[in-house]
Image: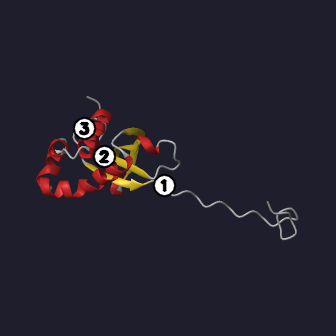
Amino acid sequence: MSQGQVAWQFLRAILRADYTAAYARLAPEVRRAVSLAHFEEAARPLWRSGQRRGQQIELYKLGVRLGAGGSSRLFYSFTFATDSGKVPPPAVLEVTFRDTTARAVLGFGLRGGRSALPKPKPASTPASGRHGARR
């Protein structure tokens, strides 16, 4: 099974509120550090978002996030299918892995989509200035 499939199944389990199945996909060191009850509490915002947006998800992007000290983590980002036409997507579900060979989930989260850059204000010209026609 590929990492992308593991990430997808992990998120689908959370969206179905099958926290035990999702918890089983966590890396052993994560399970040792986080109880099932704390995992459920951390996963509940994802589940709630799925209740509002639907449970179908689509791969949005994958990449490597560089960390402090030269460490890096592979991540897979998914969006809700209902948000697939929105740029940027309002919610991104993210799953991280230790490296390219890992099949156990190291971390996860729900992020707001990238904030859109503000549109620059047009320079004042005769056509757009105070004497220009308004539409």
Instruction: Give the percent coordinates (x, y) of residue 119.
Output: 65, 60
Between disc 3 and disc 1, the foreground one is 1
Q: Distance between the residues labelled 3 and 1?
A: 27 Å
Choose between 89 and 135: the one closer to the eye.
135
Between disc 3 and disc 2, the foreground one is 2
Instruction: Give the percent coordinates (x, y) of residue 73.
Output: 33, 47
Between disc 2 and disc 1, the foreground one is 1
Q: Mark 2 points at which residue?
A: 96
**Residue 124: mark:** none
Choose between 100 and 42: the one closer to the eye.
42
Q: How far apart are marks 2 and 1 (CA)?
A: 18 Å
Nearest to N terminus: mark 3 or mark 2: 2
Instruction: Give the percent coordinates (x, y) of residue 12.
Output: 27, 40
Q: Does residue 62 appear left or right of residue 17 in this picture? A: right
Instruction: From this view, report whether residue 134 is shown above or below residue 10.
Output: below
Q: Which residue is drawn at 32% across and 35% down?
A: 4
Task: Estimate how packed mark 3 is, as few (under 14), some (14 to 19) or many (20 or more) residues with alpha carbons within 10 Å.
Answer: some
Instruction: From this view, report whether residue 62 is shown above or below residue 118.
Output: above
Q: Distance between the residues labelled 3 and 2?
A: 10 Å
Residue type indicated by callout 2 = Thr
Residue type indicated by callout 3 = Ala
Residue type indicated by callout 1 = Arg
Q: Mark 1 points at which residue?
A: 114
Task: Estimate how packed mark 2 is, as few (under 14), some (14 to 19) or many (20 or more) residues with alpha carbons within 10 Å.
Answer: many
Q: Residue at x 86, y 65 (%)?
A: 132
What colour scheme was applied to this rendering of the protein? secondary structure
Q: Can residue 71 be seen in this view?
A: no
Q: What element carries label 3?
A: loop
Nearest to N terminus: mark 2 or mark 1: 2
Task: Estimate how packed mark 1 is, as few (under 14), some (14 to 19) or many (20 or more) residues with alpha carbons within 10 Å.
Answer: few
Nearest to N terminus: mark 3 or mark 1: 3
